[in-house]
Amino acid sequence: MEILHSKIVGKGKPLLILHGYFGSGDNWKTLGSQFSEHFEVHLIDQRNHGRSFHSDEFSYDLMVEDLHKYLEHYQLEKVHLLGHSMGGKTAMLFAVLYPELVDKLVIVDISPREYKPHHHAILAALNSIDFSIHNSRELVDEQLSTLIPEFGVRQFLMKNIFWKDKGVLGFRFHLDSLTKNNPAIGEALPMNARFEKQTLFLKGENSDYITQNEALIIDAHFPENKIVTIKNAGHWLHAENPEQFYTVVFDFLKN
């Protein structure tokens, strides 16, 4: 049985953090270190990401089962669960299916609704990399910039590049599987899914992932919810305004 890779820091009640699409637990290192002063923080790599196992199969149902095996392996229960974007969808479904294992839920800049596939430019750019030609970080960045003009997005993606063999770069994520299964990322939470415990939704002020129209759909699935806007931040709000992010989440979890 393959168990998700994670970095565990701190002591106390378990706080499990799930990254977004193309990300890894490493994206949460700085905030994880802050939270570790009060919690046992698990920075988890989901399947096909970071240092976790690769699989041709990729869906929220599978990612939820991966997480359930992870909790069983580490004998965790009554955890706080925080998920960003894709990780937020995994966290929502996990909380719905295993409510007895979750104490409080934090969902970062994603709602339960369906999202149409919208990562085509990123996937096209990543698939245009030929590591036999693009054999330095500079050359990879140059190639990516032809389809991804935003420096911040390229920097985020470049965190996934590592030296696979001597002189040979590679991606940590399983690009073939992510490309093939891309439509699965936008799937909605099942219609009748409900989680009755306290849930915090965080939205970036400059992000359109959670709009004002979504309060009703969030209420239907998570009746005990609170929605807070993180100022001066887009979709990567935890990186763009970590101070407000930390304060809001800690205040929610500490009680």
Image (spheres, rainbow, N blue to C red):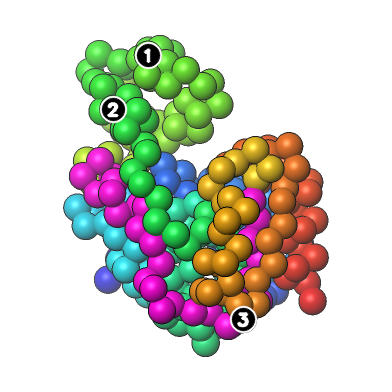
Tell me: residue 22, above or below residue 245: above
Residue 190 included in the magenta stretch of the image = yes
Tell me the residue at 46%/44% (across/down). Answer: 23
Q: Label 2 amino acid?
A: Ala
Task: Decide which of 195, 40 is in the foreground and name it.
Answer: 195
Is residue 103 something that shows in the picture? no
Tell me: residue 71, above or below residue 236: below
On the rendered structure, is 206 left or right of 158? right
**Marks 1,3: beta carbons within 8 A:** no
Reading the image, the residue beneath label 1 is 146
User: Residue 124, labelled with which disc?
Assistant: 2
Task: Decide which of 160, 118 is in the foreground and name it.
Answer: 118
Tell me the residue at 32%/16% (across/down). Answer: 135
Q: Position of residue 110 (x, y in %)?
A: 52, 54
State which region is magenta: 178-203
Tell me the residue at 80%/56% (across/down). Answer: 247
Quadrant assignment, res 2: bottom left
On the rendered structure, is 21 left or right of 101? left
Tell me: residue 218, above or below residue 99: above
Q: Position of residue 80 (x, y in %)?
A: 61, 72
Q: Label 1 amino acid?
A: Thr
Tell me the residue at 51%/83% (across/down). Answer: 99
